[in-house]
Amino acid sequence: MSQSYNRGLIEDFARWREFEAGMWAWIFHKFTGWVLIGYLFTHIAVLSTGIPAAGASEAAIAAGNDVYTQTIVSLEGLLLVRLLEVGLLAVAVFHMLNGTRLLLTDLGIGLDAQDKSFYASLILTGAITVASVPTFIAGAF
Amino acid sequence: MAERYSSFQSGGRMWLLQRVTAVFLLVVLAFHFFLLHFVHHADEVSFLASSARMESLSYYSLMILFLVTATFHGVNGVYNALVNQGLTGTKRTVIKWTLVAASVVLIAQGIRTANAWAGIGLY
Protein backbone atom coordinates (compact mmCIF):
# COMPACT_ATOMS: atom_id res chain seq x y z
CA MET A 1 0.00 0.00 0.00
CA SER A 2 1.27 3.43 -0.77
CA GLN A 3 1.30 5.83 2.16
CA SER A 4 1.11 9.58 2.26
CA TYR A 5 4.36 11.25 3.17
CA ASN A 6 4.47 14.85 4.30
CA ARG A 7 7.90 16.13 3.36
CA GLY A 8 6.91 19.81 3.67
CA LEU A 9 7.69 22.36 1.02
CA ILE A 10 10.66 21.48 -1.17
CA GLU A 11 11.72 25.13 -1.16
CA ASP A 12 12.22 25.36 2.58
CA PHE A 13 15.36 27.43 2.26
CA ALA A 14 15.65 27.89 6.02
CA ARG A 15 17.10 24.37 5.99
CA TRP A 16 19.92 25.39 3.64
CA ARG A 17 22.67 24.28 6.03
CA GLU A 18 21.33 20.73 5.78
CA PHE A 19 21.28 20.70 1.97
CA GLU A 20 23.40 18.12 0.19
CA ALA A 21 24.79 18.23 -3.35
CA GLY A 22 21.53 17.02 -4.96
CA MET A 23 19.53 19.79 -3.27
CA TRP A 24 22.01 22.47 -4.39
CA ALA A 25 21.87 21.04 -7.91
CA TRP A 26 18.08 21.30 -7.79
CA ILE A 27 18.20 24.92 -6.50
CA PHE A 28 20.81 26.00 -9.08
CA HIS A 29 18.79 24.33 -11.83
CA LYS A 30 15.66 26.29 -10.80
CA PHE A 31 17.59 29.56 -10.46
CA THR A 32 19.30 29.21 -13.85
CA GLY A 33 15.96 28.21 -15.39
CA TRP A 34 14.30 31.42 -14.09
CA VAL A 35 17.18 33.49 -15.49
CA LEU A 36 16.99 31.78 -18.89
CA ILE A 37 13.22 32.20 -19.36
CA GLY A 38 13.53 35.83 -18.22
CA TYR A 39 16.29 36.32 -20.75
CA LEU A 40 14.26 34.68 -23.54
CA PHE A 41 11.51 37.32 -23.16
CA THR A 42 14.13 40.12 -23.08
CA HIS A 43 15.97 38.63 -26.06
CA ILE A 44 12.85 38.54 -28.25
CA ALA A 45 11.97 42.10 -27.16
CA VAL A 46 15.39 43.40 -28.26
CA LEU A 47 15.38 41.36 -31.49
CA SER A 48 11.93 42.77 -32.29
CA THR A 49 13.66 45.96 -33.38
CA GLY A 50 14.17 43.90 -36.57
CA ILE A 51 10.47 44.50 -37.38
CA PRO A 52 10.68 48.31 -37.86
CA ALA A 53 14.17 47.88 -39.34
CA ALA A 54 12.72 45.78 -42.17
CA GLY A 55 10.88 48.91 -43.34
CA ALA A 56 14.08 50.96 -43.66
CA SER A 57 15.54 51.83 -47.06
CA GLU A 58 18.02 49.45 -48.70
CA ALA A 59 20.70 52.13 -48.39
CA ALA A 60 20.11 52.53 -44.64
CA ILE A 61 20.22 48.74 -44.12
CA ALA A 62 23.38 48.40 -46.23
CA ALA A 63 25.01 51.18 -44.20
CA GLY A 64 23.88 49.63 -40.91
CA ASN A 65 21.78 52.68 -40.08
CA ASP A 66 18.60 50.70 -39.36
CA VAL A 67 17.17 50.58 -35.83
CA TYR A 68 18.01 46.87 -35.31
CA THR A 69 21.70 47.16 -36.20
CA GLN A 70 22.03 50.39 -34.22
CA THR A 71 20.33 48.88 -31.14
CA ILE A 72 22.51 45.76 -31.12
CA VAL A 73 25.73 47.66 -31.84
CA SER A 74 24.96 50.15 -29.04
CA LEU A 75 24.20 47.37 -26.55
CA GLU A 76 27.26 45.32 -27.51
CA GLY A 77 29.39 48.45 -27.11
CA LEU A 78 28.63 48.46 -23.37
CA LEU A 79 31.06 46.50 -21.22
CA LEU A 80 28.24 45.76 -18.76
CA VAL A 81 26.25 43.99 -21.50
CA ARG A 82 29.31 41.91 -22.45
CA LEU A 83 29.80 40.90 -18.80
CA LEU A 84 26.11 40.03 -18.51
CA GLU A 85 26.52 37.86 -21.62
CA VAL A 86 29.35 35.97 -19.91
CA GLY A 87 27.01 35.49 -16.94
CA LEU A 88 24.29 34.28 -19.31
CA LEU A 89 26.71 31.77 -20.83
CA ALA A 90 27.61 30.47 -17.35
CA VAL A 91 23.93 30.13 -16.44
CA ALA A 92 23.11 28.39 -19.76
CA VAL A 93 26.09 26.02 -19.59
CA PHE A 94 25.27 24.97 -16.02
CA HIS A 95 21.59 24.45 -16.91
CA MET A 96 22.61 22.32 -19.92
CA LEU A 97 25.17 20.22 -18.05
CA ASN A 98 23.01 19.71 -14.99
CA GLY A 99 20.04 19.07 -17.29
CA THR A 100 22.02 16.32 -19.00
CA ARG A 101 22.76 14.92 -15.54
CA LEU A 102 19.03 14.97 -14.74
CA LEU A 103 18.11 13.28 -18.02
CA LEU A 104 20.64 10.51 -17.29
CA THR A 105 19.31 10.21 -13.73
CA ASP A 106 15.77 9.83 -15.12
CA LEU A 107 17.09 6.94 -17.20
CA GLY A 108 18.66 5.41 -14.09
CA ILE A 109 22.19 6.14 -15.30
CA GLY A 110 24.81 7.32 -12.80
CA LEU A 111 22.55 7.19 -9.75
CA ASP A 112 25.53 6.31 -7.54
CA ALA A 113 27.56 9.27 -8.81
CA GLN A 114 24.96 12.04 -8.42
CA ASP A 115 27.19 14.14 -6.17
CA LYS A 116 30.25 13.71 -8.36
CA SER A 117 28.33 14.57 -11.55
CA PHE A 118 27.00 17.76 -9.89
CA TYR A 119 30.52 18.84 -8.91
CA ALA A 120 31.71 17.96 -12.44
CA SER A 121 28.92 20.16 -13.88
CA LEU A 122 30.08 23.06 -11.70
CA ILE A 123 33.76 22.66 -12.61
CA LEU A 124 33.04 22.26 -16.33
CA THR A 125 30.74 25.32 -16.26
CA GLY A 126 33.53 27.35 -14.67
CA ALA A 127 36.12 26.11 -17.18
CA ILE A 128 33.91 26.77 -20.27
CA THR A 129 32.92 30.21 -18.96
CA VAL A 130 36.49 31.29 -18.23
CA ALA A 131 37.70 29.95 -21.61
CA SER A 132 34.93 31.94 -23.37
CA VAL A 133 35.66 35.29 -21.74
CA PRO A 134 38.14 36.51 -24.43
CA THR A 135 35.61 35.75 -27.22
CA PHE A 136 32.73 37.41 -25.37
CA ILE A 137 34.71 40.52 -24.47
CA ALA A 138 36.41 40.96 -27.89
CA GLY A 139 35.77 44.38 -29.40
CA ALA A 140 34.21 45.83 -26.22
CA PHE A 141 37.18 48.10 -25.53
CA MET B 1 5.27 -0.93 -2.10
CA ALA B 2 7.60 1.88 -2.88
CA GLU B 3 6.37 5.34 -2.01
CA ARG B 4 6.51 8.21 -4.44
CA TYR B 5 7.93 11.46 -3.11
CA SER B 6 7.93 13.39 -6.39
CA SER B 7 5.51 16.24 -7.04
CA PHE B 8 5.48 15.40 -10.74
CA GLN B 9 2.85 13.09 -12.17
CA SER B 10 4.63 9.98 -13.33
CA GLY B 11 4.07 9.12 -16.97
CA GLY B 12 2.47 12.52 -17.66
CA ARG B 13 2.58 13.93 -21.15
CA MET B 14 3.98 17.28 -19.92
CA TRP B 15 6.71 15.46 -18.00
CA LEU B 16 7.78 13.66 -21.19
CA LEU B 17 7.54 16.83 -23.33
CA GLN B 18 9.75 18.69 -20.84
CA ARG B 19 12.44 16.02 -21.33
CA VAL B 20 12.05 15.72 -25.12
CA THR B 21 12.37 19.51 -25.51
CA ALA B 22 15.37 19.42 -23.13
CA VAL B 23 17.23 17.02 -25.45
CA PHE B 24 16.43 19.17 -28.49
CA LEU B 25 17.41 22.39 -26.70
CA LEU B 26 20.73 20.93 -25.52
CA VAL B 27 21.82 20.60 -29.14
CA VAL B 28 20.22 23.73 -30.62
CA LEU B 29 21.16 26.09 -27.76
CA ALA B 30 24.80 24.95 -28.02
CA PHE B 31 24.62 25.53 -31.81
CA HIS B 32 23.01 28.97 -31.28
CA PHE B 33 25.72 30.11 -28.83
CA PHE B 34 28.49 28.69 -31.00
CA LEU B 35 27.24 30.24 -34.25
CA LEU B 36 26.41 33.69 -32.86
CA HIS B 37 29.33 34.16 -30.47
CA PHE B 38 32.20 32.05 -31.77
CA VAL B 39 31.68 31.81 -35.57
CA HIS B 40 30.15 35.29 -35.81
CA HIS B 41 30.92 37.80 -33.09
CA ALA B 42 28.63 39.99 -31.03
CA ASP B 43 30.07 43.24 -32.39
CA GLU B 44 29.51 42.13 -36.01
CA VAL B 45 25.71 41.86 -35.76
CA SER B 46 23.76 43.61 -38.51
CA PHE B 47 20.28 43.43 -40.02
CA LEU B 48 21.83 42.26 -43.31
CA ALA B 49 23.69 39.35 -41.66
CA SER B 50 20.65 38.27 -39.58
CA SER B 51 18.50 38.57 -42.69
CA ALA B 52 20.90 36.46 -44.80
CA ARG B 53 20.78 33.64 -42.23
CA MET B 54 16.99 33.79 -41.83
CA GLU B 55 16.38 33.68 -45.61
CA SER B 56 17.53 30.06 -45.54
CA LEU B 57 14.46 27.85 -45.01
CA SER B 58 16.37 25.30 -42.90
CA TYR B 59 17.73 28.01 -40.56
CA TYR B 60 14.32 29.76 -40.37
CA SER B 61 12.54 26.47 -39.52
CA LEU B 62 15.17 25.55 -36.93
CA MET B 63 14.86 28.95 -35.23
CA ILE B 64 11.06 28.79 -35.12
CA LEU B 65 11.23 25.29 -33.62
CA PHE B 66 13.90 26.59 -31.20
CA LEU B 67 11.60 29.44 -30.14
CA VAL B 68 8.58 27.16 -29.63
CA THR B 69 10.49 24.47 -27.70
CA ALA B 70 12.41 27.00 -25.56
CA THR B 71 9.16 28.82 -24.70
CA PHE B 72 7.41 25.57 -23.79
CA HIS B 73 10.37 24.25 -21.77
CA GLY B 74 10.88 27.54 -19.92
CA VAL B 75 7.26 28.36 -19.19
CA ASN B 76 6.42 24.78 -18.22
CA GLY B 77 9.47 24.84 -15.94
CA VAL B 78 8.24 28.01 -14.27
CA TYR B 79 4.77 26.47 -13.84
CA ASN B 80 6.27 23.29 -12.29
CA ALA B 81 8.41 25.40 -9.94
CA LEU B 82 5.33 27.34 -8.79
CA VAL B 83 3.33 24.13 -8.30
CA ASN B 84 6.21 22.72 -6.22
CA GLN B 85 6.09 25.94 -4.21
CA GLY B 86 2.52 25.08 -3.27
CA LEU B 87 0.43 26.89 -5.90
CA THR B 88 -3.12 25.52 -5.90
CA GLY B 89 -6.76 26.31 -6.69
CA THR B 90 -7.85 29.47 -8.50
CA LYS B 91 -4.40 31.04 -8.27
CA ARG B 92 -2.96 28.01 -10.05
CA THR B 93 -5.54 28.28 -12.85
CA VAL B 94 -5.01 32.04 -13.26
CA ILE B 95 -1.22 31.69 -13.37
CA LYS B 96 -1.43 28.75 -15.77
CA TRP B 97 -3.48 30.72 -18.31
CA THR B 98 -1.37 33.86 -17.81
CA LEU B 99 1.70 31.80 -18.67
CA VAL B 100 -0.09 30.33 -21.70
CA ALA B 101 -1.00 33.86 -22.88
CA ALA B 102 2.58 35.10 -22.33
CA SER B 103 3.88 32.13 -24.34
CA VAL B 104 1.53 32.87 -27.24
CA VAL B 105 2.63 36.54 -27.29
CA LEU B 106 6.32 35.56 -27.13
CA ILE B 107 6.03 33.02 -29.96
CA ALA B 108 3.95 35.39 -32.13
CA GLN B 109 6.47 38.22 -31.63
CA GLY B 110 9.37 35.88 -32.37
CA ILE B 111 7.74 34.68 -35.60
CA ARG B 112 7.02 38.29 -36.64
CA THR B 113 10.70 39.13 -36.11
CA ALA B 114 11.90 36.05 -38.02
CA ASN B 115 9.50 36.93 -40.86
CA ALA B 116 10.82 40.49 -40.98
CA TRP B 117 14.38 39.18 -41.38
CA ALA B 118 13.39 36.47 -43.87
CA GLY B 119 11.54 38.99 -46.06
CA ILE B 120 8.22 37.20 -45.51
CA GLY B 121 5.40 39.73 -45.83
CA LEU B 122 3.56 38.56 -42.67
CA TYR B 123 4.96 40.66 -39.82
Image: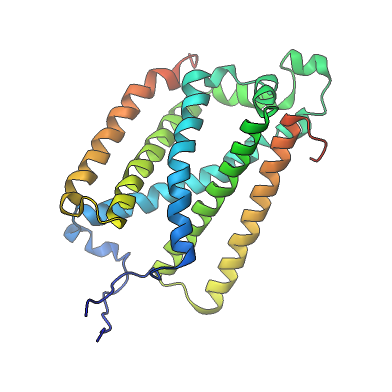
Quarter of the view holding residue B27: top left
Residue A54 visible here: yes
Q: Which residue does the image show at 31% across and 52% down from the upper left?
A: A102
Image: B9 above or below B33: below
Image: A79 above or below B84: above
Q: Position of residue A90 (x, y in %)?
A: 37, 35
Image: A30 above or below B83: above
Image: A122 above or below B9: above
Quarter of the view holding residue B103: bottom right
Horizontally, residue A126 falls left or right of residue B73, namely left
Q: Which residue does the image show at 34% across and 29% down from the upper left?
A: A129
Q: Which residue does the image show at 18% across and 58% down from the upper left?
A: A17
Horizontally, residue A106 falls left or right of residue A20, namely right
Give the quarter of the figure containing the N terminus of chain A. bottom left
Q: Position of residue B22 (x, y in %)?
A: 44, 48
Q: Position of residue B38 (x, y in %)?
A: 46, 20
Q: Which residue does the image show at 42% across and 19% down from the upper left?
A: A135
Q: Position of residue A95 (x, y in %)?
A: 37, 44
Q: Nearer the viewer, residue B63 or B112?
A: B63
Specify the color scheme: rainbow
Q: Nearer the viewer, residue B7 or A134?
A: B7
Horizontally, residue B90 falls left or right of residue B81, namely right
